[in-house]
Image: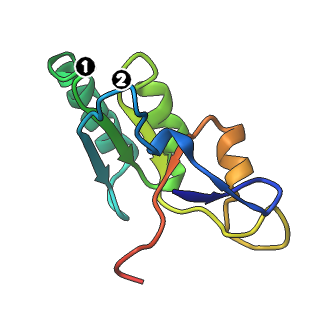
Amino acid sequence: LKVPEASGRIGFCTSAIPSRTMPRRPFVGGNWKSNGSVESAKTLCAALSSGSVAYRNKVEVVICPIAPHINLVSKLLRKSPIKVAAQNVSASAEGAFTGEVSAGQLKDSRIGWTLIGHSER
């Protein structure tokens, strides 16, 4: 899986490539699209956290909240096995790209996942 690095070069996301020695875990991702409020994010995170014991270490779960809620959701799920992803990442490194978020900025915010290639665009 190719992802842009902070330098603007294309790098490889090795966490998405299955290891030859480890069996592959099922993956479930949930994209919130352009939905939700702070209150609904808190409610959903509480429900997801309380149910995470049932699938811990069995399924990799990643959710993609709206950009303004990424930090809140990350904090709410910090003790959970659920990972948080951005809904988009810029193909460019930092610069004069209004509204864009670079891979380096996501990494700096400890966001290790992002969606790319949106069907509705």
Rendered view: 113 above or below 118: above
Residue at figure coordinates x 84%, y 73% from the top left: 96
Judging from the image, the colouring scheme is: rainbow
Q: Nearest the camera: 52 or 9?
A: 9
For disc 1, the marked residue is 56
Q: Which residue type does callout 2 highlight?
A: Pro
117 displayed left or right of 89: left
User: x, y percentage for residue 34?
Assistant: 37, 64
Rendered view: 55 above or below 88: above
SS at badge 2: loop
Rendered view: 114 above or below 78: below
* Mark 1 vs 2: CB contact within 8 A: yes
Q: Nearest the camera: 38 or 11?
A: 11
User: x, y percentage for residue 64?
Assistant: 40, 50
Q: Which residue type does callout 1 highlight?
A: Arg
- N-terminal-most mark, 1 or 2: 1
The image quarter in which residue 77 lies? top left
Quadrant position of the C terminus in the picture: bottom left
For disc 2, the marked residue is 81
User: x, y percentage for residue 95?
Assistant: 85, 67
Residue at figure coordinates x 65%, y 67% from the top left: 90
Q: Nearest the camera: 36 or 14?
A: 14
CA gap between label 1 and label 2 equals 6 Å
